[in-house]
Image (cartoon, rainbow, N blue to C red):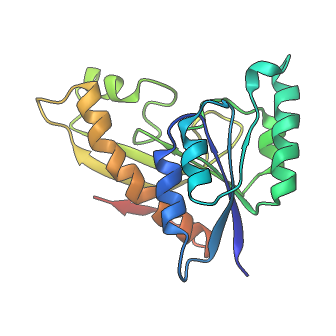
Amino acid sequence: MTQRVAILISGGGSNMLALVASMTGDHPARPVLVAANDPAAAGLARAAAGGIATAAVDHRAYGDRADFEAALHAVLAEARPDILCLAGFMRILTPDFIARWEGRMLNIHPSLLPKYKGLHTHARALAAGDTEHGCTVHEVTAALDDGPILGQARLRVTAQDTAETLAARVLPLEHRLYPAVLRRFVEGERGMLTLA
């Protein structure tokens, strides 16, 4: 049975586009919704241009996080996804929201978790003198950037790297890793995938 996937974004949606592009042919999942917490997120127009249903739930329109999440959940409930993928979704979700999606929500993070949870991961890797950096796909749990790691992609840090160049070099790895992990996840594979 084909699995239904909803993708949450906050910006341009490059990881969303990589996920959507992968869900064709014999892939066991299909995208049913792209939703953003910012109506101006460029990824919404990009998804709509690809024929995917979109929704905007502006977090600024709600008095608190619970109200925002209730509205977001209502939008998701209409789309009836089996799996929820966070792809550059820049809102911290509450444990109550996450509990509704336990075991069915994935996230991509631009570091080799458990290193550098949160923001500014590339600058933090450089400041620490790391020789290796990359990205991680993990199941979402109530703890920030935690949860079982399903895949990682790595690259060597060079002496010339800045936070900007490192981010630019990691992004193509994200675009390869996230679709690969999603397919395995839909197929029931929870083992660790490593890409170089």
The x and y percentages for residue 54 are: 70, 48
User: Viewer-proximal residue, 119 or 4?
Assistant: 4
Q: Residue furthest front?
A: 49
Query: Looking at the rendering, in which quadrant would you find the N terminus?
Result: bottom right
Q: Is residue 188 above or below residue 128?
A: below
- The total of numbered circles placed on residues is 0
Q: Is residue 128 left or right of residue 182?
A: left
Q: Residue furthest top?
A: 63
Q: Quadrant of residue 30?
A: bottom right
Q: Position of residue 39 (x, y in %)?
A: 67, 31
Residue 99 in the image: above or below residue 79: above
The quarter of the picture where the C terminus appears is bottom left
**In-image side of 182 versus 193 (left or right):** right
Res. 133 visible in picture: no
100 left or right, relative to 148: right
Task: Tell me which residue sits at (83%, 60%) in the image.
Answer: 80
Residue at image x 81%, y 57%? Answer: 79
Residue 162 is at least partly visible in this image:
yes
Quadrant of residue 88 within the rendered picture:
top right
Residue at image coords 40%, 50%: 174
Residue 10 drawn above or below residue 19: above
Picture coordinates of residue 52 (x, y %)?
Answer: 65, 58
Q: Position of residue 117 (x, y in %)?
A: 50, 31
